[in-house]
Image (cartoon, rainbow, N blue to C red):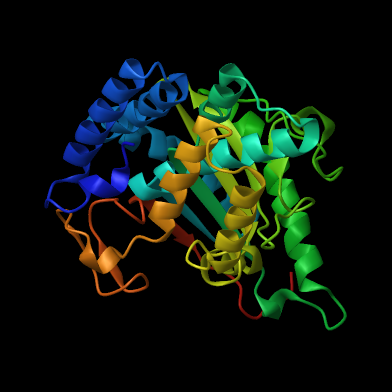
Amino acid sequence: MILLNDYLYNGDTVVKILHSYTQDLKKSAIGNNNGIDLAHSNCLLQMIELLEHNDFLTAQSQKIREFYKYMADKYPFLAFTFKGRIKSLIRLEEKINGNIVEFIYDHYRTTGTFPSETEIKDQIGRIKDLIAYRIVVSLPKCHLKADENRQARELGYLYEIANALPDFLEERGFNPELSGIEPCSMTIDGPYRKYYRDYIENPNNYGYKSLHISFFDNTSRSNIEVQLRTKEMDDNAEIGPANHLGYEKRQEKERSRREEIPVGKCVFFDDAYERGMRLQELDLSKVDVNMFGATNNNLINDGCGLYRGRLILPYEHLSRFQNDLI
């Protein structure tokens, strides 16, 4: 089996690793008539294109910045950040394999049969967050009355922002894409509910909460995702139980899936499961990748986007008012 792990110890750059892994994965897929590995390699090709031809990011981030300016004018009393990043190679590989494992497992549990190659490929095609922007909002305590609920107020502003975002970006060349996921909060206006994946109304098992919406950028011909969170939600995702590093419970869940679908029942499940588990067990301190270093799996200096992604833009807006009640 072709594994990303085997390409991380030669001191190569992330782009070189991507080229080598993708080419070998594609060659193996063709030789074994494995349509899922072929779709997997095609998804990785999108990452190569993005890393090698990223001149459009400046223009794209400037358009996103227009929404930041809109928010600064409309909500001067809020504190908020705008962040943009290109997905890291390891996170992309985890997501591809995770989507395959979860979909096959759920399909098998529900129907007692395995999905078709076409259905599994569709799960890989759903990955549209190679470029993602995150908006995190916070209402300073000085703007709260004694009996006001901070979480409720922040959530109200977050949904207001969510209702303004689709039309604002569509006017600037970003077409919102159907989410295909229901239900969505009734707080989101009717015309926009079909675009959002509402993980606030429907948090995952680790308490992850966020609003996600995908757009197609007509200028760069690429997909982007925008995530909207309150500071509390962001803390939970970054340093709380939903953090990527807190994977012990995920490992237990993955192993239970392995027990229910024994080796040999579905080759696509077997391959994706093995790749995903090997990545979870990766010792980053032993990895030899150009511009990457780690003391352990928590102390990491990532200058190449192997593990933490590449930053596109950081914008910060601090509340303009610290004394006046708004």
Q: Quadrant of residue 29?
A: top left
Which of 35/315 is in front?
Answer: 35
Identify the residue shown where x is 53% and y is 41%: 263
State the quadrant of the N terminus.
top left
Q: Is residue 203 visible?
A: yes
Identify the residue shown where x is 71% and y is 35%: 108
Q: Is residue 319 visible?
A: no
Q: Is residue 308 left or right of residue 228?
A: left
Asked if 212 appears above or below 242 in the picture, the reply is above
Asked if 1 appears above or below 227 in the picture, the reply is above
Q: Position of residue 235 (x, y in %)?
A: 58, 69
Q: Is residue 94 left or right of residue 248?
A: left
Q: Position of residue 325 (x, y in %)?
A: 74, 75
Asked if 52 appears above or below 17 in the picture, the reply is above
Q: Position of residue 293 (x, y in %)?
A: 21, 65
Residue with the most extreme left position = 11
Q: Position of residue 39 (x, y in %)?
A: 43, 23
